[in-house]
Amino acid sequence: MLRKNLATLFNLFPILLLLFPMLNSQEELLSRRKRFLVWQPGNNWVQLVVGIGIPADVDDHSITWGASMKAFYLLPDNSSYYDNPTIDYARRRKRATSRWDLYKSIIYFVERSGLGDGKACLLRAICELAEIPLEQTSGLFAEILHALLTPSSTPEEIQEYGDLEYHAAEKLGRSTGNCDSLYSECRHSLISKFTKLFSYIK
């Protein structure tokens, strides 16, 4: 008798296994899990860790010099982050920094450093770089310097009337040279601070 009951139970077991998920799904229809538009409250973040290790050979020891960088971003747990962001994107979409803004910064730096009249020194630097052409072997730094201090290298609109002086300094450097006497208000050449100018025979 016991054997017969066990055999019946054993035969019913697969049927019960098939019915159990159906019973469970009926309960799920009546009760729903809480849904989240954003991450659940708590400490949620995305993290990125980047590192590098360089082995160093020392007599009897093994040393590894390493550096790592870690960045993480907190995930939002409230939809108000989307409706009312703390970053004002309209203010961040302001215009990009122009060449003329960069020139104003250079003028300010020169005057604060006590090198002389900032605008005259910048005009002299533009004139000197226009006087000496860029060679193929000049290098990356010289190319960057020429790009920054050659106003005609980019077609930017003039912001103020005084910005026309930069174009005039470039033209004077190309045509006449003699930039140190043209801009005598500048006591020190900015270009000579990090390079040496050689005379160029045209």
Image: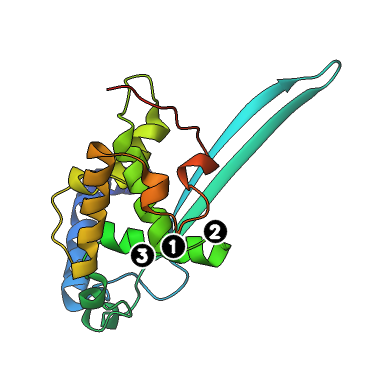
What amino acid is labelled 2 in the image? Leu
- The residue indicated by pointer 1 is 118
What amino acid is labelled 1 in the image? Gly
**Image vertical order of residue 150 relative to residue 23, above or below:** above
What amino acid is labelled 3 in the image? Lys
Q: What element carries label 3?
A: helix
Residue drawn at (23%, 63%), measured in percent from left and top? Answer: 163
Percent from the top left, x then y, of residue 16? 23, 53
Residue drawn at (24%, 59%), measured in percent from left and top? Answer: 165
**Image vertical order of residue 167 relative to residue 40, above or below:** above
Q: In this view, does 76 lie to the left or right of 54?
A: left
Q: Front-most of 162 and 28?
A: 162
Q: Is mark 2 on a helix, strand or loop?
A: loop
**Image vertical order of residue 56 relative to residue 166, above or below:** above
Residue drawn at (27%, 61%), measured in percent from left and top? Answer: 100
Residue sitting farthest toward the top: 59
Report the Cα–Cα distance between label 2 and label 3.
Answer: 15 Å
**Label at residue 115:** 2
Q: How many labels does the image show?
A: 3
Q: Which of marks 3 and 1 is nearer the N terminus?
A: 3
Q: Front-most of 28 and 94?
A: 94
Label 2 near label 1: C-beta < 8 Å?
A: yes
Q: Quadrant of the C terminus?
A: top left
Report the Cα–Cα distance between label 1 and label 2.
Answer: 8 Å
Disc 2: CA contacts within 10 A as few (<14), some (14-19) or many (>=20): some
Instruction: Give the mark toward the camera: 3 or 1.
Output: 1
Image quadrant of residue 24?
bottom left
- The residue indicated by pointer 3 is 104
